[in-house]
Amino acid sequence: MKKICVSILALICIIISVSAVSVSAAKITYMRGDADGDSFVTISDVTRIQRVLADLEKDSNGIVKRNGDVDNNGLDITDATKIQMYLAEFNDPYAIGKTITFDEYELPFIPNN
Ligand SMILES: [Ca+2]
Ligand SMILES: [Ca+2]
């Protein structure tokens, strides 16, 4: 009988502790187009994207893939081109250079200009 009471008490403690844990998604913040993570969008970001795409550099922490994918369709050479056009002050519909914040379980929001 004592073992059953202890087991029930342990089960109640587990249920209470699990229900008290609130799971919240972490906020992720980054600068769109800042493929090297130095907080600036420069030609170095274009070079970094090109080198990763050519397998000359690894993107071990995923920053190039996340920050460099300015149009949210996967990292490819057109992202480098779009950053170059941003640097040449062409129209920027991708919010390059803007800070993006989203929950880790959401897709990044692309604001309109
Ligand atoms: Ca940069
Ligand atoms: Ca892309």
Image (spheres, helix red, strand yellow):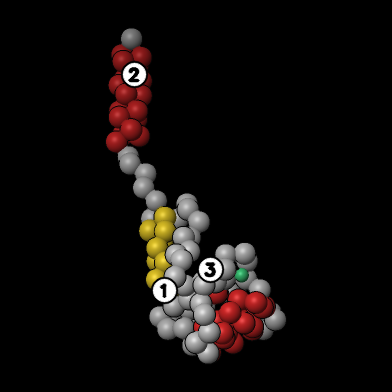
Q: In the rendered picture of this protein, how many numbered marks are placed on residues?
A: 3
Residue bearing the label numbered 2:
8
Q: Is mark 3 within 8 Å of ligand 2?
A: no
Q: Tag 1: Cα neighbours inside 10 Å, few (<14), some, or many (≥20)?
A: some
User: Which percent across, then down, holds residue 100?
Assistant: 42, 67
Callout 2–callout 3 Cβ contact below 8 Å: no
Closer to the camera in the image, 85 or 75: 85
Amino acid at pointer 2: Ile
Picture quadrant of ligand 2: bottom right
Closer to the camera in the image, 91 or 5: 91
Q: Answer with the quarter of the image where residue 62 lies.
A: bottom right
Amino acid at pointer 1: Lys
Relative to 33, 53 lies left or right: right
User: Which percent across, then down, holds residue 48?
Assistant: 58, 83
Q: Tag 2: Cα neighbours inside 10 Å, few (<14), some, or many (≥20)?
A: few
Residue bearing the label numbered 1:
98
